[in-house]
Amino acid sequence: MQEKKVSLTKSDRLHVAWRSTFIQGSWNYERMQNGGWCYSMIPAINKLYKKKEDRIAAYQRHLEFFNTHPYVASPVIGVTLALEEERANGAPVDDVAIQGVKVGMMGPLAGVGDPVFWYTVRPIVGALGASLALSGNILGPILFFVIWNIIRWGFMWYTQEFGYRAGSKITEDLSGGLLQSVTRVASMMGMFVIAALIERWVTIKFTPVVSRIKQQAGAYIDWDKLPKGAKGIQSALQQQASGLSLSKIKVTTLQDNLDSLIPGLVPLLLTFLCMWLLKKKVSPIVIIIGIFVVGVVGHVVGLL
Amino acid sequence: MSAISMILVVIVAFFAGMEGILDEFQFHQPLVSCTLIGLVTGHLTLGIMLGGSLQMIALGWANIGAAVAPDIALAATASAIILVQGGQGTHGLGSAIAFAIPLAVAGLFLTMIVRTITVAIVHFMDAAAAQGNSRKIDFWQMVCICLQGLRIAIPAALLLIIPASSVRDLLNAMPSWLSDGMTIGGGMVVAVGYAMVINMMASREVWPFFAIGFVVAAISDLTLIAIGAVGLSLALMYLQLDKGGSGNSGNGGNGNTGDPLGDILDDY
């Protein structure tokens, strides 16, 4: 048996990794990612099995139900490649073992992939790109696209290789504390950054004027007494820098009062309201439409 | 809009549709798709700005289990087309964002249709597998991906056929109180995405991190990268202390723990 041992080369494994980019392509309500999974495994199956009936059996066992986060499918693919390779070389690896590894890994791994990628990395990288893009800076989209794809491809390739090398041993390790630690760090960092984003990017400005105070002479820039031309501009800027106000009347809006209390308090309350509504099973779409209605009505009555 | 621009817009929409299901390269995220539509129509800056605004709104949108998030792919491409066709420049951003929301809902419906069609296609794959024909499985996989692409490309093409003048009339007919109000709503609606993220991650353990993050954000000198670094460091410190407290001196906690992968490899 030793003389005709088949093994997967690095290029075979790269081929599989590239195909796994399309794992969700045939996502369906019946068996979810099964089509994409089989599609990813095809180069390996064709390499390992030469007999037609072996191939047919392999295609069919990889069209079984499968569903996890698309990126963390990679370590599962790696392990499955290792198992298929052993099987092709005559080791007693049966269908149940392979199916067992796939199903056993997909659940816990999806529990890692969702919070780490969708709820930590994407909001952070997305917010970074979006904050640049808001002012029309092309670096925003480019940074987002490049950083994301480096992280994604690096993760997919290395975890697939890791799974392939670790083989079936990986299952014991994955259920251990390691994955839990990764998820914990991700959710702690995610919460930290999300809180910062709420403060920075949720904008609500209450416009009602609380008070108009006529200021004393000397507290504002007296535009009539400025010298003419460039000198005047210079002097005005200097006066402003030294803390004089621009107009005679000091206007305090409701927003100014709230900001001096806690900046970002209202956005925070709004977020809590949304969380509460979501927990009450109100559809996010309904909430979004509701907020737009509030925005328009609030603007019309002069509150926002 | 020239014929070449139109074809390129449809191609961008096709990629956005594919990515809407694949979720790999992120062509469907507004930051990318709006920018590309802006690029091929000659309104690059406008596209980037719309992309940034929509991205902020959609930060927390992700399909998890049974929870279905609005479909950002259709929302981003269609509102970018409307913005460009409307010709109002940056003034049209508010109303373009407002159009995006109902489109995101309509997109959900289209996704459901395609995912149901795919059930039938998977049975064709079964048949191909029984014949041992791997090329046929590949073919059907490609068909599915293309269907997802068409899901966005067809609505985009339809929007392009509507003459620019009628889009403009429609937008001009929108009174300013409505579009200003929509802009204000757009500033607040961001909270929904954040709320979705928090509901997913919140536990008693992580709330203090939330509080610190909120307070630290008020220091406007800190960039987002700095805030991220502070957050990551705090999380790692917490984990390290937690491990030490429970008695087993944590292995793997000391190297480059920031990299989950390095972590896994260190353990081996």
Image (cartoon, coloured by chain):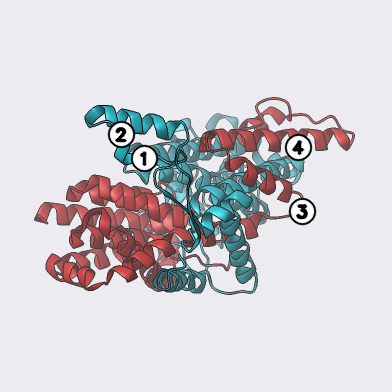
Chain colours: A cyan, B red
Q: Is residue B245 left or right of residue B160?
A: right
Residue tagged 1: A222
Q: Are marks 4 and 2 in contact (CB under 8 Å)?
A: no
Q: Are marks 4 and 1 in contact (CB under 8 Å)?
A: no
Q: CA distance from mark 3 to mark 1?
A: 55 Å
Q: Pick the quarter of the image with the C terminus of chain A.
A: bottom left
Dot 3 crowding, Cα within 10 Å, few <14, some 14–19, many 20+? few
Residue A240, how many percent across, how many down?
Answer: 41, 35
Dot 1 crowding, Cα within 10 Å, few <14, some 14–19, many 20+? some
* Badge 3 and badge 2 in a common chain: no
Residue A169 sits in quarter = top right
Residue tagged 4: B238
* Badge 2 and badge 1 in a common chain: yes
User: Measuring 44% from the left and 46% from the top, which residue is drawn there?
Assistant: A46
Label 1 amino acid? Asp
Q: CA distance from mark 3 to mark 2?
A: 59 Å
Residue tagged 2: A226
Residue A64, how many percent across, how many down?
Answer: 55, 62
- Letter of the chain that mark 3 sits on in the rendering: B
Label 3 amino acid? Arg
Q: CA distance from mark 4 to mark 1?
A: 55 Å
- The tag earlier along the polypeptide, 3 or 4, is 3
Q: Secondary structure at mark 3?
A: loop
Label 4 amino acid? Tyr
* Badge 3 and badge 4 in a common chain: yes
Residue B39, how many percent across, how many down?
Answer: 23, 46
